[in-house]
Image: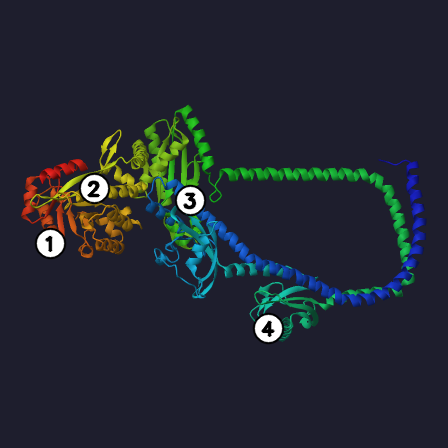
């Protein structure tokens, strides 16, 4: 706004008064302060010279004290931090084991549950791959030693390190503490040098359900090294003034942190200069005497000339370090030089100063008065400018928030790697499409795509190439569909394509979906390129049609199920969903659930089929499991055994069968007329490979006081083929204890004389497929003769399975078959009926 004439008077009076006042004050103060400055400046130069050295030394001492405090704290924290991390890792393992025990104990026996816990902990690693979990019994026997599996099962209470410390005893004492957990230190072989031992810190915790100790440990030198590097990085970032810093050497003169640079990498590989060698010698001598101040020459980083530096040298007290806090003396002496120059300049130009100060004061007074008059009018202008600036800033922030919100929304609904829709967006669009198709009665399609053998690419070429393949696959799939269709990455190497509207006719919609799927198949089969490398990949595609009455999650399950059927069909193909798939899957799930209940409620029964010799005399039986279902009645093993094997229930089932069979064999042994009978029990692949299988067999033999030769374990050829050496070793051990073995279904698998001669077998069982055609089928007859002849040469007993007619029996007798089993001699019956029939035959 415009000022009136009267309103201008005040700024003029302010200008005149300010000019007069400032002039008088300037003359008085300039004279007084000039005299005082001359007097005090001479004294200040001398005082600064005296105090400069003291200040420099104090500055170096403070820096040295701070660094030594950091070193002491870091050294003290090494064991504390290691202990904290060990407690955290062992608590995780203990919690995992306890959760598995509580969850799985109703479904698993003790041996199976122990194996499950051990295999769960075995692959876990931490501490950059050095750390692992170990498990031991409180008796001192190792249960899990991932890095030394040869020690598992060994009892090593007297194991010592290179200093005579008992390792296992110390672990047991820590676990026996009132808290049920504790620490133990010993020495163990370094991972980088198998010939040397190093200090190791271990934390163990007692796991009461199995009377185990669960523990983990790590080498203390690894943590010290990591903390030393962290500390050197902290020291590297500390500065003393403009040119000072702290260097670190060890007692051998090795430079750990550079003298002439705060970055060790700038030291280079050249030999140290003469100046550096002389400085290091001075520093080591000072450190040997307990520390102190030294002076030495060093090239100036500015001029390059050799310049004096002052340094405080002290031993660090840990790790054989020597600390050197150093600074160029020029930095301090420069202060003195500036003071002298100011003094000389002020002395030679005192009168000029008076005049200059007076003139400047007057000028400032005039300018100040003029500014005051402008201030009131400019106040509102500045206020409006501030408001405009704030408004512009608010608009900028609003734009940023809008952009951030857009990015967040995109990330919430799209895959970061490929840019495709994610699972959340796919389901949302699928639900919308279902509503739309319900109104229009249109059919769409859902394609579930999984890349075959994708893990192989990640394992061989690396995850970066795997990510590159996923991006290329996403681009190719998007190229094969329409713009209105949705392509989503469902997770991992799985993609889903939603073809929204295809046709009103279901058959036509299926045909159109097949065309798109085949196009995708053809496109994804083409060669991929990764930085000069070539790779081929194939997909498996499951297809289900979208119709209005469906549910989004059900459609995804159907497409996923069809995709797995495509994989079962050999991969690199497409498969349409069939409702029978869902029915079979539901039936399988229902049977698995009912089988779990059956195991808990002991609904499984053993039936016994007689085995006779050539004269028809009863010599033994084979135990065959049956399921007495409360609704379905007696269920044959062919229906539920595959489900048990796929779900892992075969282990519990096998244990029940073994226990019941051994109990029955014990009953027969107590009856004189049946005491000579043997009993054959089928053993599954999973059961035979369990770590506690041998102990379970021997425990049952001891518990029921059996003659082990009366127990025959029937194995299949496929079980033995998987790991021949392991199978032979386990069979020989049980054979030494008296337990017999029979090779079931001989001739139907991968029969090989090379392994049959190595196996400690007692019996071969000819599969019924060769017996059915006897005596008319010439091929069956020839194969049977060869098997019996081979068994005789190998001194093995032969049992022909599935003998149902007199003609078959007579033919087998004629060619010298010693043992028989089949409906001709008796069907599988309960234990009571078997004993009744056996006693009657006696």
At label 3, counting other C-alpha atoms closer than 10 Å, the crowd grade (few under 14, some 14-19, many 20 or more) is: some
Distance, label 1 to label 2, CA atoms, is 31 Å
Distance, label 3 to label 2, CA atoms, is 36 Å
Name the one closer to the observer, 383 or 271.
271
Mark nearest the camera among 1 and 4 is 1
Residue 124 seen from this side: no
Q: Does residue 443 lie above or below 497 as drawn?
A: above
Residue 272 — which label?
4
Q: Position of residue 298 (x, y in %)?
A: 67, 71
Q: Does residue 619 lie above or below 232 as drawn?
A: above
Mark nearest the camera among 4 and 3 is 3
- Which quadrant holds the C terminus? top left
Is mark 3 in CB contact (under 8 Å) with mark 2?
no
Q: Earlier in the sequence, mark 3 or mark 2?
A: 3
Name the one closer to the observer, 666 or 716.
666
Distance, label 4 to label 2, CA atoms, is 87 Å
Residue 664 — which label?
2
Distance, label 4 to label 3, CA atoms, is 60 Å
At label 1, counting other C-alpha atoms closer than 10 Å, the crowd grade (few under 14, some 14-19, many 20 or more) is: some
User: Which residue is pictured at 30% across the width and 37% down the height?
Assistant: 599
Q: Position of residue 708 (x, y in %)?
A: 20, 50
Q: Quadrant of residue 508?
A: top left
Mark nearest the camera among 3 and 1 is 3
Seen in the image, is 127 located left or right of residue 723? right
Seen in the image, is 678 located left or right of residue 22? left
Number of numbered markers: 4
Residue 792 — which label?
1
At label 4, counting other C-alpha atoms closer than 10 Å, the crowd grade (few under 14, some 14-19, many 20 or more) is: few
């Amino acid at each position: 706004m415009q000022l009136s004439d009267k309103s201008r008077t005040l700024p003029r009076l302010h200008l005149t008064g300010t000019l007069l006042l400032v002039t008088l004050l300037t003359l008085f103060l300039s004279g007084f302060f000039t005299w005082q400055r001359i007097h005090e400046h001479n004294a200040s130069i001398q005082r600064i010279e005296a105090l400069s050295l003291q200040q420099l030394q104090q500055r170096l001492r403070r820096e040295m004290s701070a660094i030594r405090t950091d070193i002491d704290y870091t050294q003290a924290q090494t064991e504390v931090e290691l202990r904290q991390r060990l407690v955290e890792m062992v608590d995780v393992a203990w919690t995992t084991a306890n959760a598995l025990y509580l969850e799985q104990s109703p479904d698993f026996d003790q041996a199976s549950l122990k194996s499950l816990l051990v295999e769960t902990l075995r692959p876990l690693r931490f501490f950059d791959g050095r750390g692992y979990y170990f498990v031991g019994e409180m008796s001192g026997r190792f249960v899990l030693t991932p890095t030394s599996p040869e020690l598992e099962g060994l009892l090593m209470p007297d194991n010592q390190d290179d200093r005579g410390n008992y390792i296992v005893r110390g672990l047991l004492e820590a676990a026996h503490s009132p808290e049920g957990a504790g620490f133990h230190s010993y020495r163990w072989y370094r991972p980088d040098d198998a010939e040397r031992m190093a200090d190791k810190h271990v934390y163990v915790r007692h796991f009461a359900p199995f009377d185990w100790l669960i523990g983990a440990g790590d080498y203390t030198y690894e943590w010290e090294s990591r903390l030393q590097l962290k500390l050197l990085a902290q020291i590297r970032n500390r500065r003393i003034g403009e040119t000072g810093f702290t260097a670190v050497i060890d007692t051998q003169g090795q430079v750990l942190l550079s003298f002439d640079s705060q970055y060790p990498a700038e030291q280079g590989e050249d030999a140290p200069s003469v100046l550096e060698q002389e400085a290091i010698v001075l520093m080591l001598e000072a450190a040997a005497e307990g520390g102190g101040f030294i002076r030495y020459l060093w090239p100036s980083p500015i001029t390059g000339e050799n310049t004096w530096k002052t340094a405080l040298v002290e031993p660090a007290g840990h790790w054989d370090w020597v600390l050197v806090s150093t600074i160029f003396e020029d930095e301090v002496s420069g202060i003195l030089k500036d003071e002298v120059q100011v003094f000389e300049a002020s002395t030679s130009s005192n009168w000029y100063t008076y005049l200059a100060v007076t003139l400047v004061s007057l000028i400032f007074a005039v300018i100040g008065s003029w500014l005051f008059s402008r201030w009131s009018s400019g106040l509102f202008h500045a206020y409006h400018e501030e408001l405009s600036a704030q408004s512009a800033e608010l608009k900028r922030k609003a734009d940023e928030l809008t952009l951030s919100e857009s990015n967040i929304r995109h990330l919430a609904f799209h895959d970061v790697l490929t840019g495709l829709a994610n699972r959340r967006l796919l389901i949302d669009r699928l639900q919308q499409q279902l509503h739309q198709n319900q109104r229009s009665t249109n059919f769409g399609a859902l394609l579930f795509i999984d890349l075959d053998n994708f893990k192989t690419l990640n394992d061989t070429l690396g995850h970066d190439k795997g990510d590159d393949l996923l991006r290329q696959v996403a681009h190719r799939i998007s190229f094969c569909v329409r713009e209105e269709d949705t392509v989503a990455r469902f997770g991992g190497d799985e993609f889903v394509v939603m073809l929204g509207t295809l046709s009103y006719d279901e058959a036509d919609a299926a045909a159109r979906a097949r065309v798109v799927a085949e196009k995708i198949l053809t496109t994804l089969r083409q060669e991929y390129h990764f930085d000069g490398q070539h790779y081929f990949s194939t997909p498996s595609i499951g297809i289900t049609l979208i119709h209005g009455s469906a549910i989004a999650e059900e459609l995804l399950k159907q497409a996923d199920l069809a995709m797995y059927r495509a994989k079962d069909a050999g991969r690199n193909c497409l498969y349409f969903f069939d409702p029978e798939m869902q029915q079979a899957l539901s039936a399988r799930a229902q049977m698995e659930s009912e089988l779990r209940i059956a195991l808990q409620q002991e609904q499984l029964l053993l039936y016994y089929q007689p085995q006779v010799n050539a004269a028809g005399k009863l010599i033994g039986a084979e135990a065959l499991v049956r399921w007495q279902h409360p609704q379905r009645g007696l269920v044959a093993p062919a229906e539920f055994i595959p489900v048990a094997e796929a779900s892992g229930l075969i282990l519990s089932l096998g244990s029940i069968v073994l226990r019941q069979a051994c109990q029955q064999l014990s009953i027969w042994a107590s009856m004189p007329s049946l005491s000579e009978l043997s009993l054959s029990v089928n053993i599954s692949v999973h059961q035979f490979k369990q770590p506690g299988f041998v102990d379970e067999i021997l425990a049952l033999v001891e518990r029921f006081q059996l003659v082990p030769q009366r127990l025959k374990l029937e194995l299949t050829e496929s079980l033995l083929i998987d790991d021949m050496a392991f199978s032979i070793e386990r069979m020989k051990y049980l054979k030494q204890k008296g337990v017999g073995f029979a090779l079931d279904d001989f001739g139907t698998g991968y029969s090989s004389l090379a392994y049959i001669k190595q196996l400690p077998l007692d019996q071969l069982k000819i599969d019924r497929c060769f017996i059915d055609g006897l005596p008319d089928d010439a091929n069956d007859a020839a194969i049977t003769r060869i098997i019996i002849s081979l068994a005789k040469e190998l001194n093995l007993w032969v049992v022909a399975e599935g003998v149902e007619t007199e003609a078959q029996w007579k033919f087998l007798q004629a060619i010298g078959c010693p043992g028989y089993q089949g409906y001709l001699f008796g069907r599988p019956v309960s234990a009571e009926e078997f004993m009744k029939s056996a006693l009657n035959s006696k």
